[in-house]
């Protein structure tokens, strides 16, 4: 059975009439890791959003073959709902997880202290939001995990938790797609590079 | 019908916790617009010279209140649904039901206050009354969604100013239905309202689904 979940033969992406990415040709397998690199404005976030169905521009009728796999993305801006508490957010965003609420809280406690559980997200710092989103990814364990500027907002401990999550997912042969200006160096993490500066 | 209880719960929770919640605004606005003038003039009920066109005023209050909705920013919404792995149709149906459940108590508050202070009553059957609320709730949530699809700003004040006339137009159907027209004319109004609802429902679903 093919492991390819995304295959683009002439992918062009843009906003209105402006082309950001032109004629990309690549394929993604759900048991491999990838790093999308490129300078500012190269189209890293655009490509990542397109892969994870969050793209709201135009694809100029590009030819793309997709397989329906569970994809989750952490973007550079927060996805969690500001008016709800952390626990309510965890429950809302991880309904298709097999874990019980108790186990979800256990996973969450790795990333944030439990006294934040009933705190509203609007009182959280960007780093705490990033940690909460990472915990949701661990709870849901999607087949494909995309993250934009992965080290943004995270402190030393947060970076270690992120690296641990990525390593755990790699061992379990899940796909991680990281997008940043420079390569993110993680021990025991093998990846393929999509360098947008070359296109 | 694809209704997701988690989305429904989230929508109602957000409405209850939101600082501009209708559960807070409706009683406040009612006091400001209906009760205050009565208290100031030491009256017991609204009469002709206080609200000359009281029915129209009611519609304006009604439309103004419901235009104070949390704006839907399509980009964020899509991100949220993808992160939670929810289908767009699930969101749309659950959101419509949530809006209905949120609007229902507000409508009762307004109607009771209006009836009490203008000495008028609802002149159609309860079946028509509930149908008109369902149509209004559906249209209100759909217009909120459509509005965010066609416009890129997320300024609540501008949204409020632009949405009020649209809601006002919708209220022109619901107002007469509640406030005193004959059953035969009510049939026509309800049929027109149904047509508008189906039309807007089709457009909203088309725009929500086409991106996928």
Image: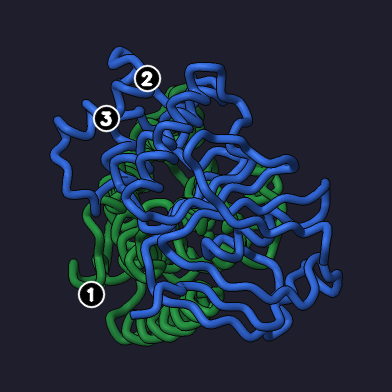
Specify the quadrant of the image occupied by residue B207: bottom right
Letter of the chain that mark 1 sits on in the rendering: B
Q: Is residue B26 above or below residue A121?
A: below
Does label 3 lie on the same chain as label 2? yes
Q: Is residue B199 visible?
A: yes
Residue identified by numbered label 2: A112
Horizontal and vertical percent for residue A140?
Answer: 30, 47
Which residue does the image show at 49% across and 22% down from the upper left? Answer: A158
Disc on the earlier residue, 2 or 3: 3
Q: CA distance from mark 3 to mark 1?
A: 34 Å
In this rendering, the label closer to the viewer, 2 or 1: 2
Tell which tag, 3 or 1, sits nearer the viewer. 3
Which residue is found at the position 23% from the left and 49% from the top? Answer: A97
The residue where tag 3 is placed is A107
* Structure colour scheme: by chain
Residue A129, percent across and down?
A: 48, 29
Q: Using the image, determine if residue A41 lies above or below residue A51.
A: above
């Amino acid at each position: 059975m093919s492991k390819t979940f995304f295959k683009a033969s002439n992918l062009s992406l843009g906003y209105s009439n402006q082309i950001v990415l032109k004629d990309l040709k690549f394929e993604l397998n759900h048991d491999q890791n990838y790093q999308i690199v490129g300078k500012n404005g190269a189209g890293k976030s655009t490509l990542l959003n397109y892969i994870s169905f969050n793209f709201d521009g135009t694809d100029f009728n590009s030819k793309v073959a997709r397989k329906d796999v569970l994809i989750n993305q952490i973007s550079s801006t927060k996805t969690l709902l500001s008016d709800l508490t952390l626990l309510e957010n965890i429950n809302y965003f991880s309904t298709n997880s097999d874990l019980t609420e108790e186990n979800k809280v256990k996973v969450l406690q790795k990333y944030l202290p439990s006294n934040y559980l009933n705190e509203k997200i609007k009182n959280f710092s960007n780093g705490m939001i990033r940690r909460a989103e990472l915990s949701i990814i661990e709870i849901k364990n999607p087949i494909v995990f995309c993250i934009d500027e992965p080290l943004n907002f995270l402190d030393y401990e947060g970076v270690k938790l992120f690296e641990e999550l990525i390593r755990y997912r790699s061992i379990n042969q899940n796909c991680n797609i990281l997008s940043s200006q420079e390569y993110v160096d993680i021990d025991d993490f093998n990846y393929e590079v999509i360098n947008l500066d070359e296109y | 019908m694809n209704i997701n209880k988690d989305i429904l719960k989230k929508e109602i929770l957000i409405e209850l916790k939101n600082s501009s919640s209708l559960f807070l605004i409706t009683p406040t606005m009612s006091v400001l617009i209906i009760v205050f003038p009565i208290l100031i003039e030491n009256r017991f009920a609204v009469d002709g010279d206080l609200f000359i066109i009281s029915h129209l005023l009611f519609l304006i209050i009604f439309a103004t209140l419901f235009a104070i909705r949390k704006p839907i920013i399509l980009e964020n919404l899509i991100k949220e649904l993808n992160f939670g792995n929810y289908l767009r149709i699930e969101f749309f149906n659950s959101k419509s039901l949530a809006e209905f459940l949120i609007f229902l108590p507000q409508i009762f508050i307004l109607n009771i206050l209006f009836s009490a202070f203008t000495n008028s009553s609802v002149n159609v059957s309860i079946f028509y009354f509930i149908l008109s609320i369902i149509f209004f709730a559906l249209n209100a949530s759909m217009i909120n969604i459509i509005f965010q699809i066609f416009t890129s700003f997320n300024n609540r004040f501008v949204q409020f100013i632009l949405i009020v006339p649209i809601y006002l137009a919708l209220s022109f159907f619901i107002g007469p239905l509640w406030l005193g027209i004959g059953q035969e004319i009510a049939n026509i109004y309800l049929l027109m309202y149904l047509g508008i609802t189906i039309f807007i429902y089709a457009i909203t679903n088309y725009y929500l689904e086409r991106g996928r």
